[in-house]
Image (tube, grey):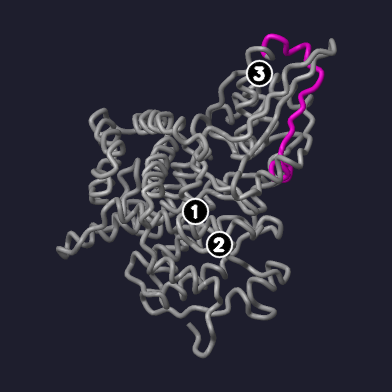
Amino acid sequence: MAQGQQTDSVIAAIADYAVNYKPTSELALDTARLTLMDSIGCALLAMDYPACTKLLGPDVEGTVVPNGARVMGTRYELDPVKAAFDTGAAIRWLDFNDTWLAAEWGHPSDNFGAILTIADHLSRKAESYSSQKFTVKDVLEAAIKAYEIQGVLALQNSFNRVGIDHVLLVKVASTAVVTAMLGGDVKQVENAVSNAWLDATLRTYRHAPNTGSRKSWAAGDALGRAVRFGMNAMAGEMGYPTALTAPGWGFQDVWFKGEEITLERDLDVYVMENILFKVSFPAEFHAQTAVECAFELHSEVAARLDEIEEIVITSQESALRIIDKTGPLNNPADRDHCIQYMTAIGLLKGSLTAEDYEDEAAADPQVDALRDKMVMKHDQRFTDEYLDPDKRSIANAVQVQFKDGTSTEKVTVEYPIGHRRRRDDAKPLLAAKFKAAVATQLDDSHVDQLVDLFADQSKLESTAVDGLMELLVPAE
């Protein structure tokens, strides 16, 4: 970093945590196992979507990088910067990976795109030099740290309110953890992380009228940048000690309207222990409980579609701000961030899959007919308990009113199936989700090996990362 300046306290705290903290929580390590399993499944599911796979592979066709990093679900061996992009884009593509909700929101499992890439690359490099390889436990510990950095930054700092995309936090978290994995000391991590803070991007592509597929590869882009910043720092590239607080030119003055970036709590294992899983269907998380309500009402409502007068969805403020959409929805990226669309599908079908966001499903006139009858309402209790650190609920309620004056029950779901409070119920469903996902790309032998491996915490943790990645390469 530049000489003679004291490093911003937030950057210094992140760097010290990334280098010196050792997670020991059994709950955090067990949950990290589930997040890795789930992220792998999400990435392999995305391999059936050409909109995703067209972006994968070397920038120059035919390039293979010796000791490069593999991209799971493919046979690519790439430069780590591109491999991080590809892996991150695949994990995120279907909006089916885990979630964190607070003043800011995001998807901490995005960080696996950088963590797995660097662990695989360094392990393959180590094999050439008879050095020590990374184990999956190393990956789980790195994930705990990345989740914590991203999630704690999100607790009180609302980047979306000033138009910044939340993938900035993926960039900061992965930069810190990756630089430490590369062998960086605290100062080198500070250098790398300061560069990540200078790299904010707009979230234009997440909102009408510009909603588009960049939201599915934005995290991959952030991860590629994170790997680059880490490698630059290890090569001796300088950092910027007051990247956040520099008067006039720092992040806080330029982007954050002079407000201070804060860490609401000490960095530990809070985020990993409380992460939210998307268990049964892909949907932006603020709408998960609304979809569960719709499933519960499906059998009653589907038989009376022509009799519906109004559908009332009661929600939290965050949902009303980001996924309350009326009018035309232009593409799958638009539809999977529209609470009315997702609720309509749930009412019509009693289920929701990634295919339901495609043009063919959206062409069903009944979907928009239901959307036109929907009214959004705010419940202050839902918002208050969404922000309460001891509850972190994501409540929605749905009630359908009919033309004859009758109505369904007002169905309320406070905590989605992927919430920590419902974790025991979710575990077998997550395992089934994983098995079904990897079976779409891998042969039965590899599927069975992966299922058995992820069912055994001790065996998984002792597995070499390059061995795990080998199981994720499909047969020719």
Instruction: Say which residue appears at 70% left-offset and 69% top-offset.
Output: 259
At label 1, counting other C-alpha atoms closer than 10 Å, the crowd grade (few under 14, some 14-19, many 20 or more) is some
Instruction: Say which residue appears at 40% left-offset and 56% top-offset.
Output: 114
Amino acid type shown at disc 1 = Tyr
Instruction: Say which residue appears at 46% left-offset and 76% top-offset.
Output: 191
Would residue 427 be found to the left or right of residue 452 on screen? right
In the displayed structure, would residue 353 be above or below residue 174? above
In the displayed structure, would residue 466 be above or below residue 356? below
Would residue 273 be found to the left or right of residue 404 on screen? left
CB of mark 1 within 8 Å of CB of mark 2?
yes
Quarter of the image holding residue 393? Answer: top right
- Residue bearing mark 2: 265
How many callouts does the rendering have? 3
Q: Position of residue 253 (x, y in %)?
A: 69, 73
Q: Position of residue 107 (x, y in %)?
A: 52, 48
- Residue bearing mark 1: 270
In the foreground, 291 or 355 = 291
> Does 313 lie within the magenta span?
yes
Residue at the front extreme of this rendering: 390
**Which element is circle 1 on?**
helix
Amino acid type shown at disc 2 = Arg
Quarter of the image with the C terminus is top left
Q: Which residues are magenta?
A: 302-321
Instruction: Say which residue appears at 72% left-offset and 23% top-offset.
Output: 410
Residues at marks 1 and 3, CA–CA distance in whole angstroms: 35 Å
- Residue bearing mark 3: 297
Choose mark 1 or mark 3, whichever is in front.
1
Q: Position of residue 444 (x, y in %)?
A: 26, 28
Amino acid type shown at disc 3 = Leu
**Who comes first in sequence, dot 2 or dot 3?**
2
